[in-house]
Image: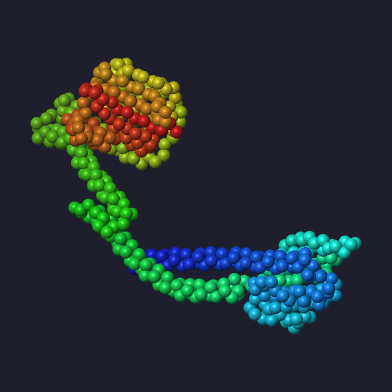
């Protein structure tokens, strides 16, 4: 039980940790998406700002690096932290502002510690065309691309939200790389995120502690429940045990388990009762011819009977035959119980019926009414023949003249059906398909009482069908067997 407890505890803790892990992944993915959206919006604001200056003529791209510095050093929004400008025609460059974490950008030139990096970004190109009359026409193009950028020390590729290029009459004049804050480095949102992270870090150990306590309680209670269920199952092996019942505080699935245990207990009791009946009836049925043989043999020994008397010899023969028949019946039923698979095939219903009836006397079979309503049936030929033979033999024991026996074969949708009616009256409270059932209500008649049990085994178990016997009307008994067409 200790091992079971720790197994349950580890399982619950694992589920808790996986839940935290998935929540962390979801939060990280959500933050990454929000960061991309944040940077995209800051970049779009800057592009709009540059576009408005170009349209109103306040920014002259042809003014060179000095003119560009004057305009670009004014950042339109505090979400933009800095700019890196390169003049394509002169090769001059400058930077204004700082990195998102507050490091001042180097003003110009290649600085010590700088490095080349390939980054994916959005480039907005302002296509500027001057007409012969000095008028300026501005259009824009946007493209996602991978570029090589010389990054100063302290600048990461992820700090750059995008670039803005100025192309005048088809010639690239300059490019601005825009550095923007992330939600984490922006003052207002950064403080909110830091507070949120601080609270999360405080909540995690508390949540883990609570989860540990819940896991321990859950595992402990489950261990007790399993121990109770195990005890209930073990009690079924004890003679004279009481029927197990679920504890009052049981949860629904535990009550369902106890309900199943109760059903198992009832089935075991019924099987035990049936087993005891089998043993009692087998003993009785085998003892009857043995007793007759014993009396006859003792009579011969004591001189009461003469061994040369023909009647005495006939009694010995009949007693031996009866004993042999009952032993053979038990052996045959045991062999039938061992069969697990059957060989189904199609065959003619009419020819099958004639084959089954052929061993019986013609005077008996000629009076049986036949109602064959199907041309072909599908089953295990030999086993179905054995089952129908037992039904006819059983009907004949109640109606030896066969004057009221009717045999019907048909197909009702998904099943094949064979029914047999004969004169007779059924005793109450008897399961005729149980082995040895006839010993309880008709011990004065011969036979081992296995006929209908053979039918039940062949039809119910091996053919996955159903077998029923009912009192159809006063003085008329109907036995029906049915099994699936496929």
Q: Quadrant of residue 449?
A: top left
Residue at x 26% of width, y 50% of height = 262
Name the foreground residue: 147 vs 71. 71
Q: Quadrant of residue 469?
A: top left
In the image, taking residue 70 as reference, residue 481 lies left or right, namely: left
> Where is residue 96 drawn, in percent x and y?
72, 78
83 versus 286 height, above or below: below
- Extreme right residue here? 132
Residue at x 26% of width, y 25% of height = 472
Residue at x 36% of width, y 19% of height = 371
In the image, taking residue 421 as reference, residue 193 lies left or right, namely: right
321 versus 137 height, above or below: above
Name the foreground residue: 217 vs 81. 81
One can see residue 329 in this view: no
> Where is residue 328 drawn, in percent x and y?
29, 35
> Where is residue 366 drawn, in percent x and y?
32, 16
240 versus 57 height, above or below: above
């Amino acid at each position: 039980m200790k091992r079971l407890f720790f197994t349950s505890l580890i399982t619950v803790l694992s589920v808790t940790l996986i839940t935290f892990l998935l929540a962390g992944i979801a939060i990280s993915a959500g933050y990454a998406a929000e960061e991309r959206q944040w940077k995209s919006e800051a970049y779009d604001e800057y592009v709009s700002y540059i576009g408005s200056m170009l349209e109103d003529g306040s920014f002259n791209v042809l003014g060179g690096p000095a003119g560009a510095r004057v305009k670009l050093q004014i950042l339109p929004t505090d979400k933009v932290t800095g700019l890196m400008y390169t003049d394509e025609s002169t090769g001059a460059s400058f930077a204004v502002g700082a990195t998102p974490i507050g490091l001042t950008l180097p003003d110009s030139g290649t600085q010590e510690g700088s490095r080349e990096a390939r980054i994916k970004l959005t480039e907005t190109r302002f296509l500027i065309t001057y007409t012969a009359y000095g008028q300026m026409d501005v259009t824009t193009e946007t493209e996602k691309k991978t570029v090589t950028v010389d990054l100063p020390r302290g600048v990461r590729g992820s700090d750059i939200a995008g670039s803005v290029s100025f192309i005048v009459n088809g010639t690239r004049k300059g490019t601005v790389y825009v550095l923007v804050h992330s939600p984490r480095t922006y003052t207002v949102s950064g403080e909110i995120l830091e507070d949120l992270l601080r609270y999360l870090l405080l909540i995690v150990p508390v949540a883990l502690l609570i989860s540990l306590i819940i896991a321990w309680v859950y595992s402990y209670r489950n261990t007790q429940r399993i121990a109770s269920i195990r005890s209930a199952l073990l009690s079924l092996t004890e003679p004279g045990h009481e029927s197990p019942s679920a504890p009052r505080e049981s949860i629904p699935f535990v009550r369902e388990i106890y309900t199943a245990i109760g059903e198992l207990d009832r089935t075991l009791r019924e099987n035990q009762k049936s087993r005891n009946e089998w043993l009692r009836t087998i003993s009785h049925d085998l003892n009857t011819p043995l007793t007759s043989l014993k009396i006859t043999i003792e009579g011969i020994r004591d001189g009461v009977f003469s061994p040369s008397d023909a009647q005495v010899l006939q009694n010995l023969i009949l007693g031996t035959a009866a004993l042999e028949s009952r032993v053979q019946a038990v052996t045959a039923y045991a062999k039938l119980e061992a069969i697990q698979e059957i060989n189904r095939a199609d065959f003619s219903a009419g020819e099958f019926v004639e084959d089954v009836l052929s061993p019986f006397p013609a005077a008996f079979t000629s009076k049986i009414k036949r109602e064959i309503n199907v041309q072909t049936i599908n089953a295990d030929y030999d086993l179905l023949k054995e089952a129908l033979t037992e039904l006819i033999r059983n009907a004949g024991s109640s109606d030896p003249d066969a004057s009221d026996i009717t045999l019907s074969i048909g197909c009702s949708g998904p099943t094949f059906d064979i029914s047999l009616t004969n004169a007779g009256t059924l005793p109450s409270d008897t399961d005729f398909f149980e082995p040895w059932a006839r010993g309880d209500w008709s011990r004065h008649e011969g036979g081992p009482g296995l006929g209908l049990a053979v039918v039940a085994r062949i039809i119910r178990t091996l053919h996955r069908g159903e077998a029923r016997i009912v009192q159809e009307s006063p003085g008329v008994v109907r036995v029906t067997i049915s099994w699936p067409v496929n």
